[in-house]
Amino acid sequence: MVTIKDISDYLGIASSTVSKGLNNATDISDETRDKVIAAAIELGYSPKRRKHFTGLNGQFERKVCVFIENMDYENREQFGYDLIQGFKQSAEIRNWKVDIVPSNLNAQSKNEYDKFMITNGYSGAFMIGFSIHNDYSMQISKTRMPTVLFDNYVLNNPKVGYVGTDHYEGLKLAIHHLHSLGHTKIAFLNGARNTMVSSQQTQAFSTIMNELNLYVDPHLLESGYYVPDCAKYHVPKFIDRGATAIICASDLIASGAISEVQKRGLKVPEDISIIGFDDLPICQSITPQLTSIRQDRLSLGKSAMMLLDCLINNIPISKAILRADLIIRDSTAVVKNRD
């Protein structure tokens, strides 16, 4: 583990000067501060605690942050809410302070990830909602900062871990449930195409269908976005191709799928069964109530903090994968012959 003394020896300056540079003290030059931060990044320094300079009496605190992008989290109805609440609960038990840092591509282009973490005194981060192609995600592959990714993964970096749900298990539960009801023409409306999870889910869907000797019609396999509106671009085609059931990569997509089916004069589940993913509160407020693959978001958040705490303490855990569950409600039923 790199210490302040290591940075001091590397730069040939006093440890007190390094400490001031890392803690944003005002009585050193910007040039010296920049040299300290650059050396800290190069050597792989990670702050375990940060000192706030308040006159002669500095106070220490341990801080981590949650970077969040492309995901709503302000209220209980939204996916990110319980994820963050679980993370905060687990952090509080471990005496970590948590800051929420909403992010976007413009902010990322102005900040180097490791530099941002060190200058703000963060010992680690939980990253939610980032695509594999954005700037921060590319920096994560070589970061020295303990980092946990939600539904994303990078190879060959012991400082980075991954937390998520077993999507293969979830889809297997859903497909086997539909198959037990007599469905063979099953469509899958996935989320955003260029994500690790979407790729995994597409592969899992095809594998499970093949295991059951069910034909994977490429016209019944599409990608969209995690919003209800995307259903209108794909569900009509699914219906025209004879699909009797649709699995959606999120409950929001599934709610849009129900609306599209009903617009065409068909009924859910009498004519078409629909399954969502996540088991958000919306599942019980729409008609019919939605069968959904449940992700335990509170436990996912708690597991992310547990994993981050391990990485901060140099325990190189790679993945924490939680079990999925199928919550059966009113949107699935025995197949109706539509041929």
Image (cartoon, rainbow, N blue to C red):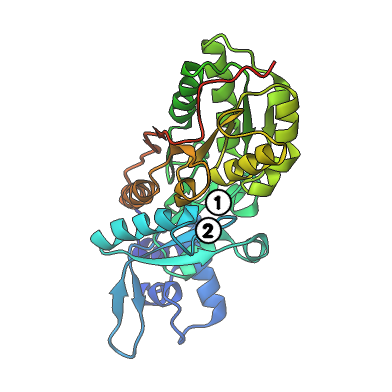
Q: Which mark is residue 148?
A: none
Q: Residue furthest top?
A: 213
Residue for badge 1: 129
Q: Residue 108 or 10: which is nearer the viewer?
A: 108
Q: Quadrant of the C terminus?
A: top right
Q: Is residue 293 above or below residue 29?
A: above
Residue 98 location (% of width, % of height): 38, 65
Q: Residue furthest left?
A: 93
For label 1, the SS is loop
Q: Which mark is residue 68?
A: 2
Q: Is residue 193 visible?
A: no
- Circle 1 residues within 10 Å: few <14, some 14–19, many ≥20: some
Residue 210 location (% of width, % of height): 57, 12
Image quadrant of residue 61?
Answer: bottom left
Q: Residue 194 or 122: which is nearer the viewer?
A: 194
Q: Is residue 119 left or right of residue 236?
A: left
Residue 170 location (% of width, % of height): 45, 30
Q: Cβ–Cβ below 8 Å for labels 1 and 2?
A: yes
